[in-house]
Amino acid sequence: MGSKFLNFFNKNNLNLVVVAYTIIMMAVILSIVITPLIFRSDESLAKISYNIYAPTCHQITQRSLCVFYQGDEISKIDNCLSEETPIYIKSIAVEYGDGSVGYKFPVCSRCLAIYVGMVLGVAFYLIQKDKTKFPNILIFVILIAPLALDGTLQLIGLHQSNNLLRIITGLIAGGAVPVYLLPMLSKISSVFLSKFTNELKIK
């Protein structure tokens, strides 16, 4: 019975890696998206999500998107604050000029776009003829260059970015990740499966 399972995993290793990766990334996106939705009803639960993502993202409110409510109804998803707001803050809840109250996603607009791109990029990976091969690394460099350029130029004060640019560059960079990451994960899991299979045969 055990050998049948191992044979199944060996034969379907690549497909299982793709499915597992997609499920994990979808779970990450879901946890991000639902956080501002549950903040109104359970702040303590929502704050767990903000704390989890804090080490990976600056969570600056001016560079984030918010879910806005008019009363009990969701009115829009928009920039939390204007980029021109003089002092960077990390408030979870903000009030908009029209009186609506917004609740911030636990990651900034760029990080959110990267995560979404990391799921959408699976489609680009699946249309490749040889799914075990790494595309030319130069393509990856070109795809992440807009994100690096946008972020670096803002950091040194030569350019003022905005959430639309962050979303576009994040989607492009995120979309490139699975095309290179999935073949790597497939090879790593194949090595572990081979070692595990050999150990079982020895025993």
Image (cartoon, grey):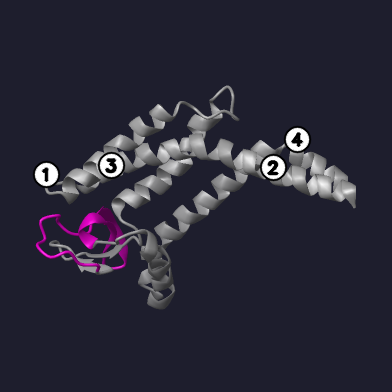
> Is 8 located above or below residue 38 in the figure?
above
**In this rendering, the label closer to the viewer, 4 or 3:** 3
Rendered view: 36 above or below 162? below
Q: Could you classify mark 2 by the number of other residues whose Cα lies within 10 Å: few (under 14), some (14-19), or many (20 or more)?
A: few
- CA gap, disc 3 and disc 2: 33 Å
Closer to the observer: label 1 or label 4? Answer: 1
User: Where residue 57 sits in the image (x, y, percent)?
Assistant: 34, 59
Q: CA distance from mark 1 to mark 4?
A: 52 Å
* Most distant residue in the top direction: 129
Instruction: Name the quadrant containing residue 100.
Output: bottom left
Instruction: Give the labeled residue for mark 2.
Output: 191
The residue furthest front is: 202
- Sequence-earlier tag: 3 or 2: 3
- What residue range appears in magenta? 61-90
- The mark nearer the N terminus, 2 or 1, is 1
- Picture disc at residue 158: 1
Identity of the amino acid at label 4?
Answer: Lys
- Tell me the CA gap for discs 1 and 3: 13 Å
Answer with the quarter of the image where residue 59 lies: bottom left
Say which amino acid is labelled 1.
Answer: Leu
Element assignment for label 4: helix
Q: Earlier in the sequence, mark 1 or mark 4?
A: 4
Residue 26 or residue 174, whichever sits in front: 174
Left or right: where does residue 29 sit relative to residue 198?
left
